Image: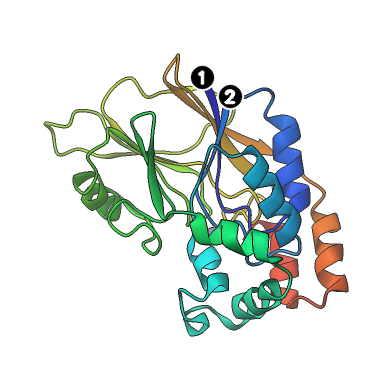
Amino acid sequence: MRVLVLSDIHANLPALEAVLADAGTWDALWFLGDLVGYGPDPVTCIDRIQALAAVALAGNHDWGVLGRIPLQTFNAAARWVLEWTRNQLPASLWAYLERLPPQAEAEGFTLVHGSPRAPIWEYILDPYTAWENFAAMSARVGLFGHTHVAIAYHIPRPEEARLLIVEPVYNEPLSLQEGRWLLNPGSVGQPRDGDPRAAYAILDLETMTWTFRRVPYPVRETQERMRRLGFPPFLIERLAYGE
Ligand code: ZN
């Protein structure tokens, strides 16, 4: 079974389309949250994921649109887009967002948006936070998003207090056979590692491998849509730099 793992699409349709075209064939799509926010195409992106995803989670921006998180907790630019997004969604898509859980189990993997111990909120940005979250997770392998940076944290031997940070090597399958893993595919719609290309991953359950992938997409197309809609300039510009 070949699983396409996506996170943080953020209503960026050209990025999502580039990923779907690049991914080849897959048997299941797992989405780790943040369908909306930041980007100009919430309706089409929700439609696509509703049609394609076997598992889909809610992220903090999805909850922000729904009003489950106060908008004051977001910065001004993000808040502007969340308010704009609220006015775009038909009732059926609103209801779909409401049904998305903050975490899920699939094929023995734990799936969260932020972290196993705080699925909506916590950012796993350092080995210490990763270590604490391994302790909070019963599955051997967990998948997370939220930081918009592709990364793997690895405990080679659970009986030893040693944790490795594994930087992505794109297109090279990483074996998950040994030890424990926390894996982040990076962000489809708003990468923040200095590389503007859309990020995603392929999880192969037969070979038990994880492959980080990157694909360029027409950034200018997304930026043009945002400009026409009067989006905050900071959000338009950052897409070009992947920051
Ligand atoms: Zn996000």
**Residue 234 position by quadrant:** bottom right
Residue 228 percent across, percent down from the top left: 88, 72
- Ligand 1 lies in which image quarter? bottom right
Residue 73 percent across, percent down from the top left: 47, 80
Identify the residue position indicated by label 2 in the image. Answer: 27
User: Tag 2, which secondary structure?
Assistant: loop
Q: Crowding near pointer 2: few (<14 within 10 Å), some, many (20+)?
A: few
**Of 184 and 16, the residue lying toward us:** 16
Would residue 236 be found to the left or right of residue 127 on screen?
right
Residue 180 percent across, percent down from the top left: 27, 32
First-in-chain label (1 vs 2): 1
Q: Crowding near pointer 1: few (<14 within 10 Å), some, many (20+)?
A: few
Name which residue lies at 84% across and 72% down. 227
Residue 20 percent across, percent down from the top left: 71, 36
Residue 198 visible, this angle: no
Identify the residue position indicated by label 1 in the image. Answer: 1
Name which residue lies at 79% across and 54% down. 219
Locate the C terminus by quadrant: bottom right
Amino acid type shown at disc 1: Met
